[in-house]
Amino acid sequence: MKVLYFDCAMGAAGDMLMGALYELCPDREGFLRDLNGALAGLAEVSAEPDSKRGIRGTHMRVLIGGREEGAEPPEEPVHHHHHHHVTAAELAEKIDALSLPERVKANAKAVYGLVAQAESRVHGQPVENIHFHELGSLDALADILGVCLLMERIGPEKVFCSPIRVGSGTVKCAHGILPVPAPATELLLRGLPIYAGEIQGEMCTPTGAALLRHFADGFGPLPLLRVEAAGCGTGTKDFETANLLRALLGQTEEQMEDEVLELSCNLDDMTAEALAFASEELFKAGALDVWTEAIGMKKGRPGLKLSCLCRPEQREALLKALFLHTSTLGVRENRCRRAVLERSAYTKETALGPVRFKQAQGWGVCREKPEYEDLARLAREKGLSLRQAEEQARKEQ
């Protein structure tokens, strides 16, 4: 499986993402030609070799009216900045009018949709009343379209991302001085793994946050990956640490790894019946697995540790089920990566009748086993032991 991994140890911005992906693009000249042709003079995008702390990368320069973002003449007042103030609907119309593949335009509109929803919540206004400032400007539009077009050209099957450094301190924007991460950025990253780091300033921009939120299938450490190519997109600022974003492109097997949460609590005052009921309800709420372990608790009391695995998006439902169906006052949470085999199922006609078989493959192994419920039913019907039923089910007809 073709996998793309973003290393965001120095945060993320639209130009950094575009620069890293540009270095992975099989036809760089064609990309710039097509992007600039679609922008039709609204902005001009170019790629320039750059270096941060001795590490080579690419800086994507976006010129609007011959000037790069943030490079206005000193005499130009700040409030005459070239940012456009447009609504989400107007941006969608602008994108629809561009000469780009439909999927590229759909992705770009989806990214702006995420930002519009975040801005709507921050300002307490309906989405249709939101007017974009930084993100509505032409330089941000070029960054978003560039990243969406490059993702289409590279064509990864899965996209993963590291925990994102967001920085700390404050940032100056159209609404004044705001804490880092800015409110809209925080909303766009909510539920994703982020950290501040030691650098003061904005490390992750709203554009970068929205693009990662839209394209990434998962967040965490670098998965097992046979790296085939790497790209580096550089930022505009210089720090003691190289200010760049890396993109790694490689091959991995389908569903080799995923991310799960382990939720657990200690119990010493529930009956076996109540615990069995709680376990059933956890499965109904979406748990991947539920189990108990014997433990010793305070005052010498024997107890049980009740644990369950779930996907990150099921966290809230499982927490509610644990508090509702157990007597616990607190639940521990651990985020885990697990190696998994790809699973599938099929029905096989056997001498005993139809039997469902479960298959698992990957990591160099392939195995299968008959479904227990089918074997148990047939064993009872035919007067066989469970082992005899399995032996006959496995025989080729």
Image (cartoon, rainbow, N blue to C red):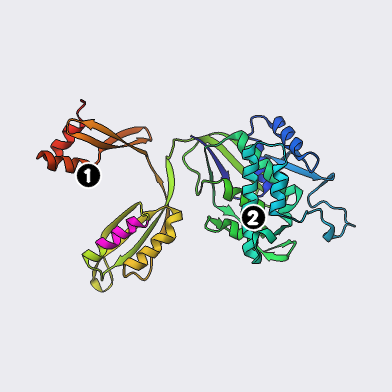
Q: Which mark is residue 265?
A: none
Residue at horizontal 78 percent and vertical 43 percent from the top: 43
- Residue 113: horizontal and vertical position, in percent? 63, 52
Q: Which of marks 1 and 2 is nearer the N terminus?
A: 2
Horizontally, residue 323 falls left or right of residue 59, namely: left
277 in the magenta segment: yes
Q: Which quadrant does the C terminus fall into?
A: top left
Residue where numbered disc 1 is placed: 373
Q: Is residue 378 above or below residue 9?
A: above
Whether residue 288 appears in this view of the structure is yes
Residue at the far bottom: name it: 299
Q: Give the range drawn in magenta.
A: 276-285
Q: Is mark 1 on a helix, strand or loop?
A: helix
Q: In this view, does 289 lie above or below 61?
A: below
Horizontally, residue 167 falls left or right of residue 385, namely: right
Locate residue 33: give its quadrant.
top right
Q: What element carries label 2?
A: helix
Give the alpha-carbon distance from disc 1 to disc 2, as whole Å.
Answer: 48 Å
- Residue 228: horizontal and vertical position, in percent? 55, 32
Q: Do the residues labelled 1 and 2 touch (CB within 8 Å)?
A: no
Whether residue 295 appears in this view of the structure is no
Residue at horizontal 82 percent and vertical 51 percent from the top: 71
Q: Main secondary structure of the magenta part?
A: helix
**Residue closest to the eye, 166 or 127:** 127
Category of crowding for the residue at label 2, using alpha-carbon neighbours closer than 10 angstroms: few (below 14), some (14–19), many (at least 20): many
**Residue closest to the eye, 83 or 202:** 83
Q: Which mark is residue 115?
A: 2
Going by the numbered disc 2, the residue's amino acid type is Val
3 in the magenta segment: no
- Residue 164: horizontal and vertical position, in percent? 58, 53
Going by the numbered disc 1, the residue's amino acid type is Glu
- Residue 140: horizontal and vertical position, in percent? 72, 49
